[in-house]
Amino acid sequence: MPAFLLPAAARAQESAVETDPGPADPADPAQADETDPTVEDTLGAEQRAQEQRYVTWQLDIRGVDAGLRALLRRHLDLARYEELAEAERITRIELTRLMAAAPAQARKLLETEGHFNARISTQVVEPAQPAAAPVNVTAPNQPLALQVVIDIEPGPRTRVGEFRLEVQGPLAVAAEAGDAEARDLVERLRQSWSLPRDGAYTQRAWADAKAGLIATGRTQAYAAIQISGSVAQIDTAGERADLFVVLDSGPRFRFGELRYEGLDHVRPDAVQALVNFEAGEPLKEQTLLDFQDRLVKSGLFDNVSVLYEPDPEQADAMPVTVRVSEQSLQQATFGVGASDLSGPRITLEHLHQRIAGYGWQAKTRLQLGRSAQSLSLDLTSHPQPGPYRNLMGAALTRTDASGLRVTNERLRLGRTQDTERIERLYFVEWQRAMTRDLDSGLMTDDTKAATVNYHWVWRDLDHPILPTRGFSLSAETAAGRSYASTDNSGFFGRLTGRLTGYWPLGASWYGQGRVQLGQVFARDAVAVPFTLLFRAGGDDSVRGYSYQTLGPTDANGSAVGGRVLGAGSIELARPFSASTPAWWGAVFVDAGNAAERWSDFKNAYGAGIGVRWRSPVGPLRIDLAWGDQSQRWRLHFNVGVTF
């Protein structure tokens, strides 16, 4: 029997059915029967049998919308015991007690949603019985099935009236003293209040609005900020809630010493180089998050957390703990995949986090594919002040595309700088590009070049690898001199730019657009390495065409590369269903080409459909595209996001 059932409710129910029989008339046979002890015993036994009979019921909540009905069903005792009635062997009198408690429970639940004038009643609908059905005074084993109805008139929802915010503590003192930053924060706190005048008052909205004040204060280094008092004055007659909040800011926290945990083969000065604050600066949450993001991007750690325990006594110089789990000193990986460029491929990679005891990472990579092979070695220093990382690299690649075999040798020396939104890469490079005709085996070009290069990437995206809103912009510049074996040597420049945008369209559609332009600046007679010229086509260019098959061709039809490039794409995508949010369908149109000069430029078009899997490591794209020039369908695979 449920322990919360109140006998007083049962007594109230029993007293409600008692009547005053009036003065007894001994001459009245009916009254004589009532005073007969045998008759009283029989009636009492019947009543007790009905009260002790086991029951089940169906609960019907009427007069409220689906949201309130769901709230009541989650929390009312009548609803919770509806499914348990038969197993718990609940009796009729226990049901009566549950029903007596239900109006008060429902009223309190409705008040959490702003309904303070609800009218609530309950009733039981008995099952139909044959007129001459006998009463079993021994309480049969089969439970009696009933219907329990709760009728509710919720009344209008209470609306927010006046809101007053009083700020106390050091923040208020600084604002009163004329500190502009403190005044701005006080105003931001008032503006951040999320329960507007005449807005619907609910307990959840009231709690969320107060939590929003705390969150706003903490972002500005008031880590000990708290609500010291709050009142919601409810005028039930006027259906209005006047709100009053007292906010105690506590001291403003400032950066103190950094403490490191978990460092072994990574030196502390490499972590210190990534620090984006000075001791004594306000300890803002975003600054900590940016610092933590820098540590994650460094590639030196598996796990990173930057944290502190707010202690008002140390607010002027709060120690901050950097807790890391370093990557293994050496790592080897093996991968199998496929792409439009290489076809099926295997990849072997080795990473050493501190080569020869120095603060340098060494990454060796071998990739073997059907139409592309490469071997590379990249040395990257641990972070240095700026934060910068020095780099050295060498690579050898061989690619078969558009009837040509292109062999490229490259040496690079430079440095990179990554911030929260911008990546910069400065380097000098020497490279040699050789091309041979696949059919004849004859060499068609052998050009070397020394260049000075600058690459720049800016991102403003809602997610680094699965964006749905925002923009990214990248630019690459190069200037140098070529050294040709068959044509003239000379100076040249190269410039490319790419803009990609992501935007939501309504509730479930998403759009993506891309524009890419490039040009080589040189006299017509100056030879430029094949790898620095432009070709279009492929899964990240114009779908519906093989990789780098669009552009100027030689007498054999091989794409030799052009000096100008233009490409663009528009794509619409949406999840297949709400139950599979990671799987999307897409439609797209691509256009672009490469040419020797802009006057010769003519777009090639591709269009098709695709499937997207938004995996934790980046999007997987599978596209089927039709090329208008090739007059054929082509399947494309791609993993990741290109900026």
Image (cartoon, rainbow, N blue to C red):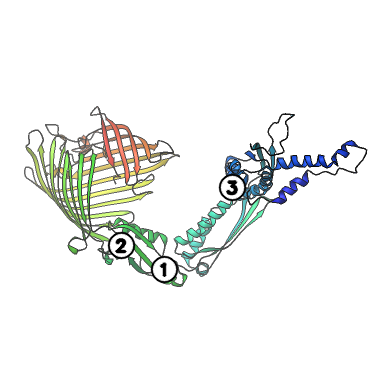
Q: Nearer the viewer, residue 282 or 71?
A: 71
Which mark is on residue 540? none
CA distance separating discs 2 and 3: 51 Å
Q: Earlier in the sequence, mark 2 or mark 3?
A: 3
Question: Which residue appears farthest toward the top when viewing the image?
Answer: 631
Residue 419 at x, y = what percent? Answer: 31, 57
- SS for tag 2? loop
Between residue 142 and residue 13, name the one nearer to us. 142
The correct choice, above or below, for 513 with respect to 296 in the image is above
Q: Which residue is mark 3?
A: 75
Q: Residues within 10 Å of mark 2 (few under 14, many from 20)?
A: many
Which is nearer the N-term, disc 2 or disc 1? 1
**Tag 3's secondary structure?**
helix
Identity of the amino acid at label 1? Answer: Arg
Gap in angstroms between the C-alphas marked 2 and 1 = 18 Å
Residue visible at 38% across and 66% down in the picture:
320
Return the residue at label 1: 254
Residue type marked 3: His
Q: Residue at x 44, y 60 (%)?
A: 219
Question: Residue 52: x and y, percent?
Answer: 69, 43
The circle on residue 274 is 2
